[in-house]
Image (spheres, rainbow, N blue to C red):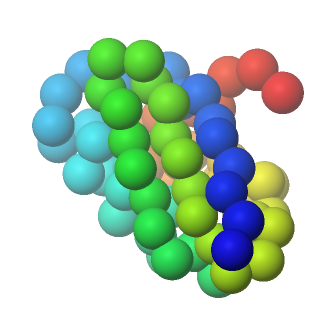
Amino acid sequence: MSTATFTVSGMTCGHCVSSVTEEVSEVSGVTDVKVELASGLVTVTSEQPVDADAVRAAVVEAGYQVVGA
C-alpha cells in the first residue's frame, strides 16, 4: 500500500468533498480517499504509488485545484 497527500483549494462544503472523493476514487489503483474539508488535505491510498498527474486531473475534473507541489 502507498499513500499520498495533496492540498486542494476551493472546497467549501460536503458536496465539494463528495465530488473530489468520487473523481479521485476513479483513478487507477486508488483504494481509498479521505478528504478533510477544513484543511483541504486529500489523502489517497493506492496499491502502488499513485500517479500524481492523474490525481490532479481528477481534482480539476471535480472543479477544484491542487495547490503546491
- Which quarter of the rendered picture does the N terminus lie within? bottom right
Residue 29, image quadrant? bottom right
Residue drawn 35% across the image and 64% down it: 22
Image x and y of residue 60, in percent:
56, 45
Image x and y of residue 3, in percent:
67, 57
Residue drawn 79% across the image and 55% down it: 53
Above or below for 50 versus 12: below
Above or below for 53 versus 1: above
Q: Is residue 9 left or right of residue 5?
A: left
Query: Visible in this render: residue 24?
Result: yes
Q: Given the current orientation, which residue lies at the most extreme front position?
A: 1
Residue drawn 28% across the image and 42% down it: 17
Q: Is residue 6 left or right of residue 48?
A: left
Residue drawn 64% across the image and 41% down it: 5
Q: Is residue 49 left or right of residue 19?
A: right
Image x and y of residue 56, in percent:
67, 48
Q: Is residue 5 left or right of residue 42?
A: right
* Number of on-image labels: 0
Query: Visible in this render: residue 27?
Result: no
Above or below for 46 versus 33: below
Residue 67, image quadrant? top right
- Which quarter of the rendered picture does the C terminus lie within? top right
